[in-house]
Amino acid sequence: MNTALLIILGFLLLSVFLGIRSTKGKEMNLEQWTVGGRGFGAMLVFLLMAGEIYTTFSFLGGSGWAYGKGAPALYVLMYITLSYVLSYWLLPVIWKYAKEYQLMSQSDFFVSKYKSPYLGVLVALVGVIGMIPVIVVQLKGMGIIVSQASYGAISMNTAVWLGAISLTIYVMVSGVHGSAWTAIIKDIMMIGIIGFLGIYLPLHYYGGYQPMFEAVYAAKPELLKFPEQGLSVSWLISTVLLLVLGFYMWPQVFSSTYTAKNEKVFRKNAMISPLYTLMLLFVFFVGTAAILKVPGLEGEEVDLALLRLSIETFDPWVIGIIGGAGLLTALVPGSLLVMSTATLLSKNVYRVFVPSATDETIGKLAKLLVPAVSLTAVYFTLNGGTTLSNIILMGYSLMTQLAPSLYFSLMKKNVVTKYGAAAGIISGLATVAYITLSQTTIAALFPFLPQSLKDINIGIIALAVNVIVMMIVSFVTRKGQYDTAETN
């Protein structure tokens, strides 16, 4: 067993220990397991939400996009920063309502706002469908990190299975408490490792940032500008808009807001978090440095850019530390994703059809569903193939379909009915499914449009269909409700 692998294993054991230790003295009922008893302060909430954002996608996918796509990778930095700005106003409202009605999941919020448990079932199923691809990203990233950092001693498939087993045990034992404790170590490691690599590698290979960009520009000038078509400026703007709207629609991010002590936590985080996002620049610097030093990576292999360049540069013990940090970027968000998926299935699907189920039964079922969720994610990880960034973008197209009905529910006078909300979500999902399966583009649908409109993210079409259907159905059903009231 090589040095790198031993160090990675050490990080894994540390995270399991922290998970077990975090539950000491706590009765791990459903509320403690999922939302930490709503007792987390600003720091833990910040780290939990950062854990959702700075994942293996940030670690590997961000550098991979900088390597393979160049300038368009900046969409990541833009949408995360703007999402934090939105959180200043959005999250305190959500937290206050959830606190008042003792909500524990995202689906609970929709059930309470629209007075419809079956809408809650729909939202829960959307959440599950949307989160599975992101769990796949974490397992795939974990597999890449362990297989590469072990210098091939452990295969990709074996690494995925080991990661899934570790993740399952970790979630079942510790719940959100373990994720929060491990997030502290993860973020310290993330800042240190990414900051070091983003500074050292450009200096080591090029003598600085300016010489690096000059060298890349001389060899591949197309990577340092937005293309005229495809991933153009209009694609960037529409993609950022889509992702900002959907940022807090992820069930695990939504539920993380419930863990806070008070609403001031979110305003503090909104002021600090955009600065933290600047760490992504160093991820992009690593990907840019790899363009000329590890040439030839194509397709899914672009996600290997950071690790391949690091392996060529450093001794095994350094690779072990990098791999350990990467492992934690998969474990923290992966645990929250698996836990949220299991909670939605037990509390917001099973309980609707078995209302006599007690809180204790629901809590036990949620933990028993964790292995099933992990196994499903393993299947798609081993049998699917695309880059980490593309998987994330697909997941966002699904989750953003919850945004219109949620934002309307926050209005003092919500004009959307439960039927309108459900119809909008279903039509949006159907549009996403059609677009994904048929690989349709706006250019194919509307060939007469100017190029700038052809490049708009196709997810915007699904969102537009969602809103139109939602408003039409709401108008019809609301009118029907008024007619019924007058008759009575």
Image (cartoon, rainbow, N blue to C red):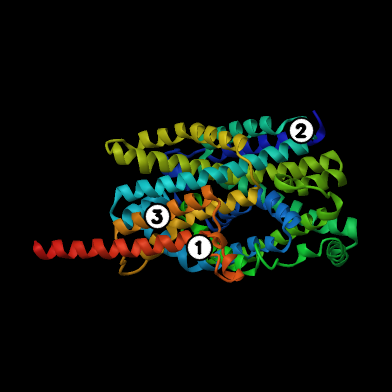
Q: Which of marks 2 and 3 is in front?
A: 3
Classify mark 1: residues with Cα within 10 Å, few (<14), some (14-19) or many (20+).
some
Residue bearing mark 1: 460
Residue 424: quarter of image:
bottom left
Q: Which amino acid does label 1 sit on?
A: Ile
Q: Residue at x 58, y 36 (%)?
A: 167
Q: Residue at x 28, y 54 (%)?
A: 115
Tell me the quadrant of the picture where the N terminus can be found: top right
Tag on residue 81?
Answer: none
Q: Nearer the viewer, residue 43 or 286?
A: 286
Residue bearing mark 3: 427
* Pointer 2 with pointer 3, Cβ within 8 A: no
Q: What residue type is labelled 2?
A: Leu
Q: Distance between the residues labelled 3 and 1?
A: 13 Å
Q: Which amino acid does label 3 sit on?
A: Ser
**Of callouts 1 and 2, which one flags the residue occurring earlier in the amino acid sequence?**
2
Residue bearing mark 2: 6
- Is residue 272 in view? no
- Is residue 154 in view? yes
